Amino acid sequence: MSVASIGAQLHEQLRTAIVTGEIRPGQALSETDIATRYEVSRQPVREAFIRLAQERLVVVLPQRGTFVVKISIRDVMDGRFVREAIEVAVVREAAALDAPARAALVEILRDAIAQQSQVASGDNASFLMLDEHFHHAIAAAVQREHAWRVVDQIKAQMDRVRYLSFDSATPVSRLIAQHREILDAIEAGQPEVAESAMRMHHHEILQSLPELAKRYPEVFED
Amino acid sequence: MSVASIGAQLHEQLRTAIVTGEIRPGQALSETDIATRYEVSRQPVREAFIRLAQERLVVVLPQRGTFVVKISIRDVMDGRFVREAIEVAVVREAAALDAPARAALVEILRDAIAQQSQVASGDNASFLMLDEHFHHAIAAAVQREHAWRVVDQIKAQMDRVRYLSFDSATPVSRLIAQHREILDAIEAGQPEVAESAMRMHHHEILQSLPELAKRYPEVFED
DNA sequence: TCGGAACAACTTGTATGGTAGTATAGCAGC
DNA sequence: GCTGCTATACTACCATACAAGTTGTTCCGA
């Protein structure tokens, strides 16, 4: 198997660097700078920037520069709204599956939760990965891969916030408990219960957003 | 105001050409070919391709070629699912606005419907534009521009189908009637009614999909 | 001291040449 | 006639050079 193109690789690397906050919002990214750093030409870098721009992770100002977009509270909240709408619809479908399909999904989710509870407190990155796995599994079970692709894009914006909040975030234990509620509702085959559990869960996730905006004003949009 | 870059312009033009079916699914797009046709260099073309690839309108196979992706029934249906989830949530918010805001929105929607009913039968393109305007207006009224951006991307895939169905589509009069139902529910401030009306509307839109897949098998994925 | 014009040091945008990989048509050999 | 190799004509990919625009600074003059 051959490797992906340099442009695609760069896109991937820069994307995670931005989402995790390694490259901070507002920072300028120069094509030539990145190019020399990664020892490639400007062209692949440019292509990576275009991809990032379409995901609204950077903004390209012609003849001026390319900048990591600052976090917009409005956009993040709006993203949560969309994600909630999608995932609620998905979990309803999941809870309405036939018994054997539900059992198979429950198996996977139970395993995911078990792993989540073993994550050391403070290891945000690991938990976020397992969290993603949990939510993705539900979508995959009802074969909504396309829907998940949409969620995944939105997640990038939300995760930028979540990586920002190491300590002030909602306690992991609480999130795990909510995952259990969702799982139970799916296992019991109760779409309405699953829906409200998922809704609650999403309302929780960005609870600390206003506080973070105060604490790190430089990474938020004016 | 200065014009956008050539790459961005090309992206726009090719996008509409693909969505409207002017460039047919499965067709190969050569960088050099497009470049000579539009009398520009290959570089902007390449950048336009990258943008199109991220919207899943084309697929780039390294060292082989770039092709307009065929329509995937599964993807389109999945897209409808997502779009319905979002627009239902949006219309609920719209119907829950305070009276003056609802009145302002109703004004806009009524105007949009009036224009829709004046479109000559068979003029699909004009109707689809007005249809988009109608749906967008609702999202804009509740300030869900981000949500609309997501819908807009999904719409591209759905519109490819709708442009395919000139005659066999749902009669325009029926769609307009459904728009009226949605409008009435918003005006009356009844979120539940608005929700079910929107849901019905979306169920209708792709009614003719299976028939189209039979009639034009060459533009659909295997 | 203040204002402004020219300049220098950046930035992204576009054009072009060369490279590596893939598919195919045609020909040689069986 | 059929199979397998080879030459060729594509393709997207990457590097490089140049063009065009923006910004900040510096220097000169009022």
Image: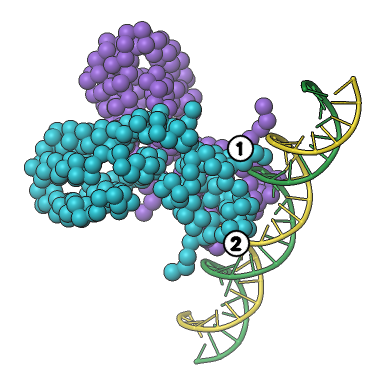
Chain colours: A cyan, B purple, C green, D yellow
Q: Do the residues labelled 1 and 2 touch (CB within 8 Å)?
A: no
**Looking at the image, which residue is at 39% across and 13% down?**
B105
**Looking at the image, which residue is at 24% across and 24% down?**
B196
Disc on res. B9? none
Disc on res. A39? 2
Q: In this view, does A129 lie to the left or right of A214?
A: left
SS label for mark 2:
loop
Q: In this view, does B72 lie above or below A84?
A: below
Q: In this view, does C29 lie above or below B218?
A: below
Identify the residue position indicated by label 1 in the image.
A61
Q: Is residue A119 visible?
A: yes
SS label for mark 1:
strand
Q: Where is residue B42 in the image (x, y as percent from the top left)?
A: 65, 51
Q: Is residue B3 left or right of residue B107?
A: right
Density class for disc 1 (Cα within 10 Å; few <14, some 14-19, many ≥20) is few
Q: Where is residue A30 in the image (x, y as percent from the top left)?
A: 61, 48
Using the image, name the chain to which the residue with label 1 belongs. A
